[in-house]
């Protein structure tokens, strides 16, 4: 088996959410943060022949980079990573499931009240603003058919803030203040369809790949208040 660039990109991204991962047999890979407030799933082009426990995903990705055009051959307890000639090899042992943080069940997204498209350009602006201002949260509000995304310090009403308006859909007669931690927006570059529920859960669906992130909102969020 050879891993595509898209699959490698997904694994690198998932390693930022959680260092360890259990890849189940099949073509769907999942990860969940240690705090269990971010869940991500991706359908990839490869079919993994067995369950694979990886304790240090960054190390595993580094192993793949040790050889040219890595090819994977799976055995019960390990995988052999060899180069295109088969002369260079790495034997990498799997970790038992009980040592890993794994998603226990899928999320059934509740009814959503707020929907919008988050472009890669807008996401980059939000992250740059957060880095520049030293803030850790983005506030999502709506008024007159427009969604406002503000990078804020929620604990300081007089702090500097960056905001950007985008189109979206939401109830016209309900006030909402949804807050997402910037540190939880560890998503692959691209454009996303975003759905947010008053149950304080959001879903980010990549427009190009079969890739989804469920991100919990901060408890300071409010709806209908």
Image (cartoon, helix red, strand yellow):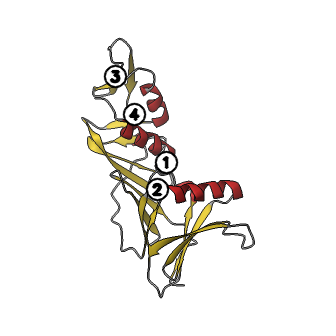
**Mark 4 and mark 1: Cα distance apart in space:** 18 Å
Secondary element under disc 2, as helix, strand or loop, is: strand
Sequence order check, earlier mark of 3 and 1: 1
Sequence order check, earlier mark of 4 and 1: 1
**Mark 3 and mark 4: Cα distance apart in space:** 15 Å
Residue where numbered disc 4 is placed? 95
x%, y% of residue 76? 28, 28
User: Mark 2 or 4, which is nearer the eye?
Assistant: 2
Seen in the picture, residue 118 relative to 5 is either above or below; the reply is: below
Sequence order check, earlier mark of 1 and 2: 1
Q: Is residue 124 left or right of residue 134?
A: left
Q: Is residue 39 visible?
A: yes
Q: Quadrant of the C terminus?
A: bottom right
**Mark 2 and mark 3: Cα distance apart in space:** 31 Å
Disc sitting over residue 17 in the figure: 1
| Name of the residue lying farthest toward the right | 158
Q: Is residue 44 left or right of residue 134?
A: left
Sequence order check, earlier mark of 2 and 3: 2
The residue lying at 40 percent from left, 37 percent from top is 8
Residue where numbered disc 3 is placed? 80
| Name of the residue lying farthest toward the bottom | 173
Q: Is residue 56 visible?
A: no
**Mark 2 and mark 4: Cα distance apart in space:** 22 Å
Sequence order check, earlier mark of 3 and 4: 3
Dot 3: few (<14), some (14–19), or many (≥20) neighbours within 10 Å? some
Residue where numbered disc 2 is placed? 38
**Mark 3 and mark 1: Cα distance apart in space:** 26 Å
User: Mark 3 or 4, which is nearer the eye?
Assistant: 3
x%, y% of residue 200? 47, 70
User: Mark 4 or 1, which is nearer the eye?
Assistant: 1
Q: Are marks 1 and 2 in contact (CB under 8 Å)?
A: yes
Seen in the picture, residue 69 relative to 196 is either above or below; the reply is: above
């Amino acid at each position: 088996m050879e891993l595509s660039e898209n699959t490698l990109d997904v694994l690198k991204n998932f390693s930022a959410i959680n260092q360890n991962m259990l890849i189940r047999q099949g073509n769907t890979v999942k990860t969940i943060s240690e705090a269990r407030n971010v869940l991500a799933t991706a359908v990839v082009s490869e079919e993994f022949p067995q369950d694979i426990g990886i304790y240090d995903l960054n190390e595993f990705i580094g192993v793949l980079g040790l050889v040219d055009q890595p090819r994977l051959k799976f055995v019960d307890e390990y995988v052999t990573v060899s180069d295109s000639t088969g002369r260079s090899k790495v034997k990498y042992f799997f970790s038992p499931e009980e040592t890993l943080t794994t998603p226990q069940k899928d999320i059934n997204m509740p009814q959503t009240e707020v929907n919008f498209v988050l472009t890669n350009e807008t996401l980059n602006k939000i992250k740059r603003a957060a880095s520049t201002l030293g803030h850790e949260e983005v506030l999502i509000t709506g008024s007159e058919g427009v969604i406002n995304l503000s990078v804020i310090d929620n604990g300081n009403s007089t702090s500097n803030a960056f905001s950007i308006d985008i189109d979206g859909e939401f109830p016209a007669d309900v006030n909402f203040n949804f807050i997402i931690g910037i540190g939880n927006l560890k998503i692959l570059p691209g454009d996303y369809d975003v759905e947010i529920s008053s149950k304080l859960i959001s879903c980010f669906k990549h427009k190009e790949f079969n890739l989804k992130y469920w991100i919990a909102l901060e408890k300071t969020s409010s709806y209908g208040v």
